[in-house]
Amino acid sequence: MPVSPLVRLSAPLSVRAPLLVAASVLLAACAVGPDFKAPAPPAVSGYVPQPAATTAATPDVAGGPAQHFESGADIPGDWWTLFHSAPLDALIDAALKQNHDLKAAQAALRVAHETMLAQRGAFLPSVSANLSASRQRQAGSLAPVPNSNAFMYNLYTPQLTISYTPDVFGGTRRAAESLAAQEQAARFQMIATWNTLASNVAVAAIQLASLQAQVDATRQLVDANTKMLDILRYQYEKGYASRVDLAAQESQLAQTQATLPPLEKQLAQQRDQLAVLTGRFPSQAGGDPIKLDSLHLPEALPLSLPSALVQQRPDVRQAQANLHAASAEIGVATAARLPNITLSADTGSTALEFSKLFTGGTGFWDVAAGITAPIFEGGTLLHQQRAAKAAYVEASEQYRSTVLAAFQNVADTLTALDQDAKALQATAKTEQAARLTLDLAQRQFKDGYTSNLQLLNAEQSYQQAKLALVQAQANRFADTAALYQALGGGWWHHPDLSKQ
């Protein structure tokens, strides 16, 4: 149970108060608990064992230029403008202004900021004023309170109370430090939401363009197969084609038509997702369509140094802020186990008539100092301190895990950029060969030099190659957007995000 010795000082307030303040300042020279130091950057020199300096090139194909990495180059703040697409710029602009998840993260930052400011009041004295008025009647058998010996009287008492708790062991400072770190965590959470939103809109728009291209290609194939079926039916009626050839073409057409509804479904879902990301209802989806052929693939890609990545990634900075808050909470828990000093002073006036307040003989004052020291709390404070230390270890491991995940994210993206460039190169060659084969097969079939089965095989191969080419093109654009996100997104170039 706490012990609270209370000392009433008989000297005037003007004499005792400066002494108490001076003593409290001297006692508050240090703060218990560890002083936080930001973790050092990881001692690694790269992201992947054998990084590629330049990706493979595929000439005359959208998304086919070679990309080279510029080590240590800065990340542009509006990196999506490098795709040279006005519709894409408009979509990301709308998302950054209208997305409700981003607005919620911004509101959470304001909550954390105001909470941090509220804690500052603990460093200052609290002052309160009170005015009481009462009408009383004393029992006749007791001595009356007023000098007039009246048994019934009115009593008016205005009073000013000042109290102050010196931060002797730094518990208040550690609490303020923790809240300031929590504000930083909320800030970087908001920046991470901003960064992820811009990347998600870019990738969603690219996927939408890819799906639209796949739908268009599939519809063209359905039209081509329908025309081929009409030709075979005519030939079958004239006796130039067998029923087997006709059935094979009917099967081919049905298979091609069956691939269209799933693509249409994905296209609609992607359009709905893009509408929601930009803060609109799916029924309000619109805007200029984005085509893969209209996108420009950035050829010079920045590659931040590993030592800079931990400063650029908002998720890593958020984890570091959480670690800082956990460190400060150790000091808060430690200070709770130590004595606490409270200073207070009261001054006021009391009179039987309101008009006589603050006249001679009505004033009163008192000054008090109290010390409260916990002696027995059933182990509560001890275990709270141990819990704070364990929470710091937890936050430390979470920070390390976040750093590793950040490096993995960059490494995976670099690998994707390299491999998807090679995949596009191979897919483009496959599509060109399949298109040439189909052209030759159609000519030979028209002249009667090849069978319907060979033509159907050529059509099937071309269909698969064309769809694979569209997907490979989209992958290269999406990989580029993913790299900018993985490296931090360039948020430090935006004044409203970079200011402390």
Image (spheres, helix red, strand yellow):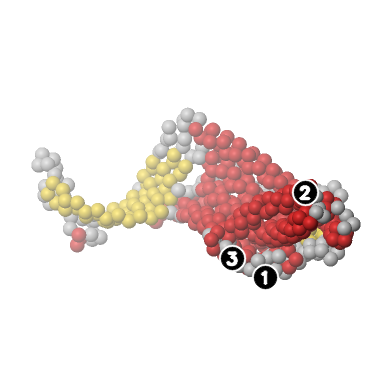
Check residue 86 in the rendering and tell me which mark sits there, or answer none.
1
Instruction: Pinpoint residue 252: horizontal percent, then vertical percent.
Output: 75, 50
The residue tagged 2 is 243
Q: Is residue 270 left or right of residue 370?
A: right
Q: Amino acid at mark 1?
A: Ala
The residue tagged 3 is 286
Give SS at disc 1: helix
Question: Are the residues flagged by discs 2 and 1 in contact, CB closer than 8 Å?
Answer: no
Q: Amino acid at mark 2?
A: Arg
Residue at image point 60% right, 39% down: 391
- Closer to the camera: disc 2 or disc 1? 2
Residue at image point 54% right, 40% down: 333
Instruction: Pinpoint residue 390: horizontal percent, then vertical percent.
Output: 61, 36
Residue at image point 82% right, 63% down: 61
Q: Amino acid at mark 3?
A: Gly
* Crowd around label 2: few <14 · some 14–19 · many ≥20 (10 Å): few
